[in-house]
């Protein structure tokens, strides 16, 4: 291993720490590297994949330029194979987030190594989805994530082409045909492992109960090391044949320090640890109008019912910095706020800088260096300038409630009536 680290350190001008991360799996990759690279790592296939993913002409030109440099440098050629092999085949080293963003021989084209690996995976992704008879339009739309990440790179790397290595791991979802883009959003089937449960009574009213042993601050959000321990409290959850006992979560995104008991004769558990749901992911860029959000979720339920009938998923769930109720307050007229209000939002574990990487490209304590170009950037900076921490949130939306939720915010309206009776 030490010989490999020294080889990588010398070949690419890296320090010891980064070289160690790149070195993981290197010998395995080199042992399988063919004398002639597979067609999908050839320039013709890479440019075809770039066209399929609708990359712009600048990026296509940079692919051609970077590829020529790589193919005339044996070390870079080995690195290209190592990146591709670990992403697509071996998976022994998927710690791309700790890989470098600069190689001496590639200079401003350094992160093209990662874009090339992503593009080389596109033909494999297509074959993976075709095995499930997925429509071609879904396959192509799903592959647009290459474009999303490439555009992110341009934004955060001074207009340069490439993909941030932090994002490269995400392509394993597509290679394994687990994630599908349907309209505005992406979805994958998942079983509930959060511990939360959702109940519905015979009148159709819905309530979410916090998981067992979740710790909350005085405002009902996840407690962290900076929370006032004297005012923190812990939830509990108990299910028997006769009742469901736990702590209420408001659809406005916070838990309430009030234990309730629901009769099993009047309430049914419609989401528990055995339930399948559609795990929603929100790709960067694109329209977030209520029409596009609604149509995407509606079509997703139809898609999974048709193509994966054995996994009944009656709800969409997501946990993300996007469902931060602070942003709803600061941007009340935004599409983001409207989407939050449509959903049953619940607290999620947060780091305090949630969303910084997505909106600013990195995390920093020096707020003065952060751009304030968009209303979202200004809102997030405002939270931090006031000495508060950014939060994440979760969301739940049942298929039976979809139309009414988008039309009338039924979770909030229903909860306001229900809470008075509990």
Image: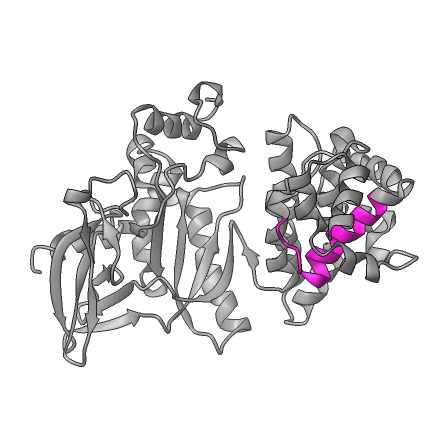
Q: Residue at x 36, y 45 (%)?
A: 350
Q: Residue at x 35, y 28 (%)?
A: 384
In the rendered view, does 222 fall on the left or right side of 10?
left
Q: Position of residue 309 (x, y in %)?
A: 49, 76
Residue 163 seen from this side = no
Foreground: 287 or 82? 82
Query: Is 78 one of the magenta-colored residues?
Result: yes
In the rendered view, does 235 fall on the left or right side of 88?
left
For the image, the number of numbered tags is 0
Please tell me in which quadrant of the rendered image residue 385 appears.
Answer: top left
Q: Residue at x 78, y 49 (%)?
A: 3
In the rendered view, does 361 fall on the left or right side of 59?
left
Residue 164 seen from this side = yes
Q: Position of residue 39 (x, y in %)?
A: 86, 57
Question: From which residue to which does the magenta span run?
Answer: 76-95
Q: Locate the C terminus by quadrant.
A: bottom left
The scheme the figure's colours follow is: one colour
In the rendered view, does 139 fall on the left or right side of 301?
right
């Amino acid at each position: 291993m030490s010989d490999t680290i020294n080889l990588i350190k010398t070949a690419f001008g890296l320090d010891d720490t980064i070289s160690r991360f790149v070195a993981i799996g290197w010998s395995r990759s080199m042992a399988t590297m063919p004398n002639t690279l597979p067609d999908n790592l050839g320039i013709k296939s890479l440019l075809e994949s770039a066209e399929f993913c609708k990359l712009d002409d600048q990026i296509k030109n940079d692919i051609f330029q970077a590829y020529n440099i790589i193919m005339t440098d044996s070390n870079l050629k080995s690195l290209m194979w190592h990146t591709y092999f670990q992403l697509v085949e071996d998976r022994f080293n998927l710690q791309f987030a700790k890989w470098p963003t600069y190689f001496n021989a590639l200079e401003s084209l350094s992160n093209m190594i990662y874009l090339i690996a992503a593009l080389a995976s596109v033909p494999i992704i297509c074959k993976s989805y075709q095995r499930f008879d997925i429509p071609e339009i879904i396959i192509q739309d799903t592959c647009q994530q290459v474009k999303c990440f490439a555009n992110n790179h341009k934004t955060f790397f001074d207009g340069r082409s490439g993909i941030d290595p932090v994002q490269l791991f995400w392509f394993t979802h597509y290679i394994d045909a687990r994630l599908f883009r349907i309209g505005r959003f992406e979805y994958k089937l998942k079983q509930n492992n959060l511990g939360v449960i959702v109940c519905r009574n015979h009148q159709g009213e819905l309530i979410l109960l916090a998981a067992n042993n979740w710790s909350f601050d005085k405002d009902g959000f996840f407690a962290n090391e900076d929370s006032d321990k004297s005012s923190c409290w812990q939830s509990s959850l108990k299910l028997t044949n006769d009742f469901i006992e736990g702590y209420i979560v408001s659809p406005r995104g916070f838990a309430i320090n009030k234990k309730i008991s629901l009769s099993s004769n009047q309430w049914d558990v419609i989401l528990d640890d055995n339930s399948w749901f559609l795990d929603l992911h929100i790709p960067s860029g694109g329209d977030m109008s209520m029409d596009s959000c609604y149509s995407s979720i509606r079509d997703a339920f139809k898609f999974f019912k048709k193509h994966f009938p054995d996994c009944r998923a009656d709800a969409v769930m997501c946990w993300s910095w996007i469902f931060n109720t602070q942003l709803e307050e600061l941007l009340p007229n935004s599409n983001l706020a409207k989407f939050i209000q449509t959903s049953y939002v619940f607290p999620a574990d947060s780091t305090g800088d949630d969303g910084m990487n997505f909106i600013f490209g990195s995390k920093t304590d020096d707020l003065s260096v952060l751009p304030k170009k968009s209303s979202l950037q200004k809102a997030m900076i405002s939270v931090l300038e006031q000495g508060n921490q950014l939060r994440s949130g979760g969301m739940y939306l049942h298929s039976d409630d979809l139309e009414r939720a988008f039309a009338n915010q039924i979770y909030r309206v229903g909860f306001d009536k229900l809470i008075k009776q509990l």
